[in-house]
């Protein structure tokens, strides 16, 4: 039940998935601001969090260049600590977005019943354009309405993929150990999915 819960997954949980976690929350706060709703209510409507398939960085802060991208776009890195993916995190998620197809397979191997709500982030963004948003439950900035709309959206995107595997281009490059330019490009690609997602949840 509410809030609508999105779990972002990458490998180490210090670069791609933390950026996606915080940039989605930022996008929702920005939508609320446009709707003249207190942006601090974001947590009531959406729970955006993340984990990594490996636990090497558990307890660490976001990788500095990833944090710079989030802060530079108006987001918040406060309180972030990397953690390893657990089955219960998948069970509690209404939508799981992975950085790559390999990680999507990892999630589904852990929890086969999560297959219909687990997508590569780029795949989900690509398929959003195929969804008839007019057929979704009505939009309102309330926990119940966002949850109902989000759950219906995930179902519609799953139907739109028709069992077809993700494209290689849906994967996010791993920017770890690379320069700010690479992190900037990856953050841009993340925003190409999280901005449309936020605008469908709160049009």
Image: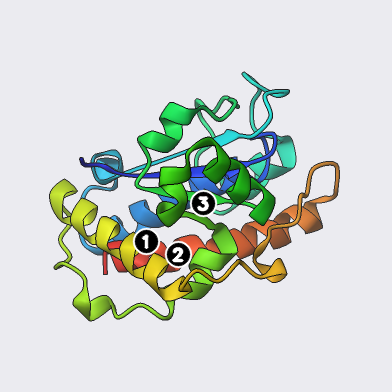
Which one is nearer the viewer's eye here, 61 or 82?
82
Residue 130, by quadrant, is bottom left
Q: Look at the image and tell me whether residue 100 can be seen.
A: no
Q: Look at the image and tell me whether residue 32 can be seen.
A: yes
Q: In this view, does 98 lie to the left or right of 181?
A: left
The residue where tag 2 is placed is: 195
The residue where tag 3 is placed is: 97
Q: In which quarter of the image is the N terminus?
A: top left
Q: Is mark 2 on a helix, strand or loop?
A: helix
Residue 91: percent from the left, percent from the top?
A: 38, 35
Q: How crowded is mark 1: few (under 14 residues within 10 Å), some or many (20 or more)?
A: many
Name above or below for residue 79 compared with residue 64. Answer: above
Residue 50: percent from the left, percent from the top?
A: 52, 37
The Cα–Cα distance between marks 2 and 1, rounded to whole angstroms, is 5 Å
Q: What element carries label 1?
A: helix
Instruction: Tell me, yes or no, whether the two marked residues, 2 and 1, touch with CB atoms within 8 Å.
Output: yes
Q: Earlier in the sequence, mark 2 or mark 3?
A: 3
């Amino acid at each position: 039940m509410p809030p609508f819960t999105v779990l972002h997954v990458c490998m180490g949980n210090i670069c791609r998935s933390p950026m996606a976690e915080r940039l989605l929350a930022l996008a929702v706060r920005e939508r609320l601001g446009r709707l003249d709703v207190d942006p601090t209510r974001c947590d009531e409507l959406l729970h955006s969090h993340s984990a990594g398939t490996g636990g090497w960085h558990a307890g660490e802060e976001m990788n500095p260049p990833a944090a710079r991208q989030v802060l530079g776009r108006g987001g918040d890195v406060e309180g972030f600590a990397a953690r390893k993916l657990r089955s219960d995190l998948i069970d509690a998620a209404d939508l799981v977005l992975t950085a790559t197809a390999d990680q999507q397979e990892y999630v589904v191997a852990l929890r086969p019943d999560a297959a219909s709500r687990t997508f590569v982030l780029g795949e989900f963004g690509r398929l959003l354009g195929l969804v008839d948003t007019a057929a979704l439950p009505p939009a309102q900035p309330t926990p119940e309405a966002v949850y109902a709309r989000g759950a219906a959206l995930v179902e519609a995107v799953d139907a739109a993929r028709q069992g077809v595997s993700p494209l290689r281009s849906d994967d996010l490059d791993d920017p770890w150990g690379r320069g700010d330019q690479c992190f900037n490009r990856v953050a841009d690609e993340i925003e190409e999915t999280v901005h449309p997602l936020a605008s469908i949840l709160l049009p």
